[in-house]
Amino acid sequence: MTVRAASTVLVGRQTELSALRAALARARGGEPGTVLVGGEAGVGKTRLLEEFGAVATAHGARLLVGQCLELGEAGLPFAPFASALREVLRQDGPGVLEGYEAEFARLLPELSRVPAVVGAPLPVSVSDAPRGYLFDLVADLLHRLAAARPLVLVIEDLHWADRSTRDLIGFLVRSGRPGQLLLVCTYRTDELHRGHPLRPFVAELDRVRGVERLDLGRLDRDGTAAILTDLLGAEPSARAVDDVHDRTQGNPFFIEELVAAGDPVGCAALPQTLRDLLLARVDRLPDAAQRVLRIAAAGGTRFAHDLIAEASGLPEAELEDALRAAVAAQLVVADPDGGYEFRHALVREAVHDELLPGEHARLHARFAAAIEAQPRLVAAGRAPAEIAHHWYAAHDHPRALVAARAAACAAADRYAYAEQSRLLERVLELWELVPDAADRLGMDHLALLEETVAATVTAGDYQRALTLTRAALAEVDADAEPLRAARLLDRRARMLAMLGKADGAVELREAYRLAGRVPDDTLRLPLLAGIAAQLARIDPVDGTRLASEVLATAQASGVDRALLPVQLTVLARRQGSADLGLAELRRAEQVARATGDAESLVVALVYLSDVLYELGRYAESAQAAADGVSEARRFGISRSTGAYLLSNQAEALLALGRWAEAEETCAEAARLDPPGVSGLHWLQLRAGQRLAQGHPGADEAVGRALSYLSRPYLHPHQRLPLRELQLEAALVAGDRDEAARAAEAALADPAVPECPRYAWPVLTALSRTAADTADAPLAGRVAALAATVPARFPAERAHAAEVAATVAPGTDRLAAWRRAVSARRADGQPWLLGRALLALAEAAAAAGERDEASAAIEEATRIAGGLGTPRLAAQAATLARRVGLRGASGGRPGADLLTEREREVLRLVAEGHSNSRIAEALFISPKTASVHVSRIIAKLDVSNRVEAAALAHRLGLLGDPAAR
């Protein structure tokens, strides 16, 4: 992976950039203005102005930049103006000063060496000169420069400006002379302590007409992700984004520094250069304030006043003085609730890393004891986790063990399963260090492993759960505790399938055998039902047989089927139900709500949204998925079961033509970073959408999605959409060899005849491949395979009609495409309708139905605009051009596109003649024939003469020679 040292993209600053462009537009109209750009160090002020400067110069403005020097009030007077004027002299020469070289020598001492200035009175010091006269000269010069074209004067780092520079800026701002001048000043907000001279200056400027302030905040998580993508050259994992964003809090400079130091996730230690930068301001504090900061760093990024007072043991007055110094230095900020927060998390991290080992343990022990004694010292509900953290950091293993388990239980009560999982992992770590761990916790090691497995699965960390199940199975005695072993085997089978490692059938069958040995038990029947339903996904025959056994047992025991796992209801609905068992799923949802079974409710909504989609009820599907997303978020299972709801919602939104919302939903799924193959669905949807849009990130998304095909196991529901994506990507790329390979792989997939919902899109892509490559044998194989797949619901019927139209003979094409478009309208998916309309337009044009072709193209163009798909719009425009619809009212397709001579040449090209043979037949030179062929290829927007001939046949551009 190539890592760039600095980001080249401007992220999250479009609002600010638009404000600067608007200010420049006003200046261009003769209304001068001033923009003050503030923000903390590293937040991107310079990067914003670099981008704005490029935009300004590209639109004809002149850009001058001056830099204040880090010398403070005693620094070089007018340093930024001197820098800007030197650039003016280099570009325009001394003549631009119009004879005032001696006066300007007060700003530019080197002018005193210019021959024209020699002999003039020696300039007096700036402090003794009549400054108003000098200010007028500078203002006149700037306005003369701005008379020819807009002038942008940028003054950077105003927080370092000397008094004279501030006065000159104030003069320019208040003079308010009409002209094309825009003044832009940047300053660091975190440098403005209470006594800083810039604070009252900025406050005064705020009251002047024409002055605008822009405050640059830190980037949000998406902004951090965009910078990481640019720096790393590839989209980072959600874990990497979360880690870097949490540590840098969206400061672009800090992001770049962490990435430059190595793997941003693995970089536990701060880079030395960044550490030195962060600690430099801490070192300037009084010793007492530094000591309090070290104590506070052990307490966390946020800390209450009472907590720091309790942990430090300092007198109130001494503590307040120290905190006041830290606040004045902009290292700590006070919040309205009476607490404090480190201004930046990395400052706390750097200070904490400076603690000595003994000091580190002692301070954390103080915090743990203080919070145990008074839980109110931290935010409500945070005491268990804080106590566990501090005892662990203090290396008090027995206390840390008990505290971690208590914190894990508290996290589970709040549905914070990821936090519960991490805490239980810590308990497992500490178990080996505490000899009487079992007595202290009141549970054996296997029970702890089972609890950790459950939390890890719910949190969505399937790889870790798989490892833990292996450890637990090594401890369990299957003969003595068959139900316990069966439950672990069931979990392991699901994890294997979720990670794409294996189907888990062996484990499931053994789990069913073990659970079947147990006498009737309240836990036995739900476990058997879940195993049967999972096995049915892999082996429908055997799974259905086992499910029937479970349902018979449930009926004999008087157990309501709706109380069994929802998956069993889903399996039952496949048995000849016209509505796929929708009523049963609705009842399962109602029962889950009534019993407060959160997990079953979310699972029911997953299947409900899925069934509604298959039935073609897309709006209802999107709503059911949205409801499920809210429930999953409420119960803390967004990353596991909730991930399916997000992708189901995105799928329904795509079908409805709400593509912008679908993209946002996929982005939300990406932020969750679902594990294993649970992260495939949203990725495959995004890849397909971007491919359809012609998005610049389409190739990367397609590549990431198709990489899942290399996994040892994928369920057909996951594999077949990838087959379709593979075919579509090859068609878009015009890669016939790849399209042929993808077609063979799709035709050989045994799941095609068994899964109509997922098979029909593959068959459609296969038929389009056959048409685009003019592969008649492939078309025949596709038609034969399609005849074996049932078409039950609107989307399937529309796909079937499209396949039939695509492989139909020429004489039947128009009628077939009319039926296909009608079926697409009934289904209601705009994108697929737009694509079918273009095919209808081709068929209509070939049949001489120009009005029908024109109407179809116009409707497809409107759909493209509504969806935001430039690719579909471009295809519509190209087709319109090819069939000569611009300004045409009748005649053959292409009448306005090709000349009569070009049509004669095209007919001979289609017959396979070379340029020499064409020249002989038409009594022209070979060079003229070559020119005609080149023009035909360009007008038809194809790559070569073979494609031109194929298109001519398809669109009916050749006409009938006898007719002429």
Image (cartoon, helix red, strand yellow):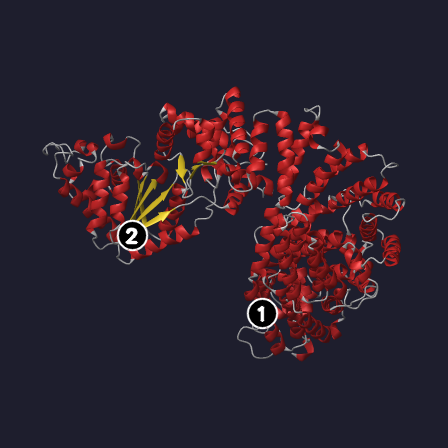
Residue 730 image position (x, y, % from top left): 68, 54
Q: In this rendering, does residue 67 appear at all?
A: no
Q: Nearer the viewer, mark 2 or mark 1?
A: 2
| Residue identified by numbered label 1 | 880
Closer to the N terminus: mark 2 or mark 1? Answer: 2
- Where is 19 relative to 46, above or below? below
Taking depth in this image into account, of 236 and 355 the one nearest to the observer is: 355
Residue that appears at 64% across and 74% down: 845
Task: Give the secondary structure at mark 2.
Answer: loop
Question: Foreground residue, 405 or 679?
Answer: 405
Q: Position of residue 293 (x, y in %)?
A: 43, 29
Would residue 747 be found to the left or right of residue 703 on screen?
right
Q: Position of residue 910 (x, y in %)?
A: 69, 65
- Residue 884: which quarter of the image? bottom right
- Residue furthest front as drawn: 373
Above or below, 433 against 55 in this view is above
Secondary structure beneath label 1: helix
Front residue of 672 and 173: 672
Is disc 2 surrounded by few (<14), some (14 to 19) or many (20+) residues within 10 Å?
many
Distance between mark 2 and mark 1 Cα atoms: 43 Å
From this view, report whether residue 9 is shown above or below residue 288.
Answer: below
On residue 648, the disc is none
Residue 892: x and y in percent read: 62, 76
Horizontal side of 398 relative to 167 (left or right) equals: right
- Quarter of the picture holding the C terminus: bottom right
Q: Amino acid at mark 2?
A: Pro
Residue 900 visible here = yes
- Residue kind at label 1, given as amino acid type: Ala
Q: Is residue 953 left or right of residue 217?
A: right
How many numbered marks does the figure carry?
A: 2
Name the residue nearer the viewer: 639 or 6.
Answer: 639
Q: Which residue is mark 2?
A: 150
